[in-house]
Image (tube, grey):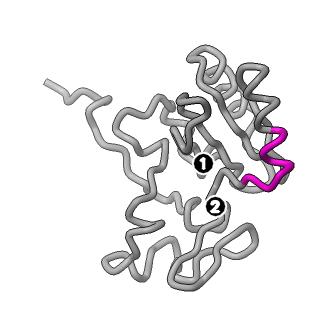
Amino acid sequence: MPADPSAIARRCGECTACCDGWLKIRIRDHDVYPGQPCPFSSAGKCTIYHERPVDPCRNFVCGWLAPTSPLPDWMRPDKSDLIFLPASFAWRAIPVDVAVAVGKRPKAKARAWLEAFSRDMRRPLLLQSDGEWHAHGPPQFLHDMVEQISGGLDPLR
């Protein structure tokens, strides 16, 4: 009998989006940000994988790789141009998902899927695209996020 496809753990494969500088992180005194990928990433491999730091590397949870990920297979970050970070922080005790563009903006299909997921599941979402944050959720969430982001909130920290 064939294995249940949903039980097969996903793997990064060729995807290195988390190391390519789309997330603002710091690794061993090196800042990683758009335009500045991780200095320990070479030819699609981590050169310090077995000694990589706990934070942010070992603690990082890619929403596509998570065992309970709601994301379809085609939403792997390097295919959708989007990194999904589930329950990145809480707003009024409600988990808020964060999505970050890989490149300038995510593919339209991926953005539409994620916005529909946010709406249908009633999960607030902050989506970074074109260098700006876009909030999806209840009106008060939108209001609060506009205030917090204009005040310097960085959902990636």
Q: Which residues are magenta?
A: 146-153
Taking the spot 70% from the left edge, 38% from the top edge, the residue there is 126
Q: Residue at x 44, y 51 (%)?
A: 61
Which secondary structure lies at badge 1?
Answer: strand
How packed mark 2 is, by other alpha carbons closer than 10 Å (few <14, some 14-19, many 20 or more), is: many
Three-letter residue code for mark 1: Ile
What's the amino acid at mark 2?
Answer: Leu
* Residue at image point 45% right, 57% down: 60
Q: Is residue 64 or residue 90 the one in the foreground? A: 90
Mark 1 highlights which residue?
83
Kindly report the secondary structure that dominates the magenta region of the rendered protein. helix
Mark 1 or mark 2: which is in front?
2
- Residue 36 on the magenta span: no
Q: Which residue is mark 2?
A: 23
Cβ atoms under marks 1 and 2 closer than 8 Å: yes
Q: Residue at x 28, y 38 (%)?
A: 8
Q: Position of residue 51 (x, y in %)?
A: 34, 80
Q: Is residue 103 above or below residue 8?
A: below
